[in-house]
Amino acid sequence: QMQLVESGGGLVQAGGSLRLSCAASGNIFSIRAMAWYRQAPGKQRELVASITDYGYTNYIDSVKGRFAISRDNAKNTLYLQMNYLKPEDTAEYYCNTLNRAQRAPWGQGTQVTVSS
């Protein structure tokens, strides 16, 4: 079973940047569509960005043009480059498979806090 460890979060001022990483165990990472999710306090977890095994990407409207998802299959690692951060991006960020049927146990997440 794939295990996921997120890192790279922190406190940043509005307009700043962060790069999140997600290290996946196992050799099934490369064949699965992966995604970044986030959960803000008092809100449901939401899908932020996804990337297929062959590199096709998709984003929610609120992060288009600011966030970029990528993957390194050789390193079993997923990335999220976040630029022009806004206070509304503040949340705990998680990675997991895009397909719910292939979902791995959720990791501990990485906290992103954007101050105004």
Image (cartoon, rainbow, N blue to C red):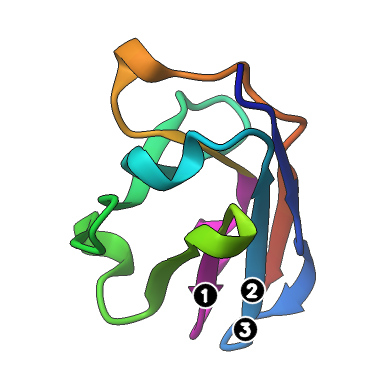
Residue 17: image tag: 3
| In magenta segment, residue 101 | no
Is disc 2 surrounded by few (<14), some (14 to 19) or many (20+) residues within 10 Å? some
Residue type at the position of mark 1: Met
| In magenta segment, residue 81 | yes
**Residue at image point 29% right, 25% down:** 99
Is disc 3 surrounded by few (<14), some (14 to 19) or many (20+) residues within 10 Å? some
Residue 114: image tag: none
Q: Quadrant of residue 41?
A: top right
Q: Quadrant of residue 107?
A: top right
Can you give x and y, in whole percent of width and height, for residue 10 in the image? Answer: 81, 65
**Residue at image point 49% right, 59% down:** 73
Nearest the camera: 2 or 66? 2
The residue wearing badge 1 is 82
Looking at the rendered structure, the secondary structure element under dot 1 is strand
**Residue at image point 63% right, 22% down:** 106
The region drawn magenta spans: 79-92
Nearest the camera: 114 or 19? 19
Of pointers 3 and 1, the one earlier in the residue sequence: 3
Which quadrant is the C terminus positioned in?
bottom right
Query: For the view shown, which residue lies furthest in the top direction?
Result: 101
The answer to whether marks 2 and 3 mark residues whose Cβ atoms lie closer than 8 Å is yes
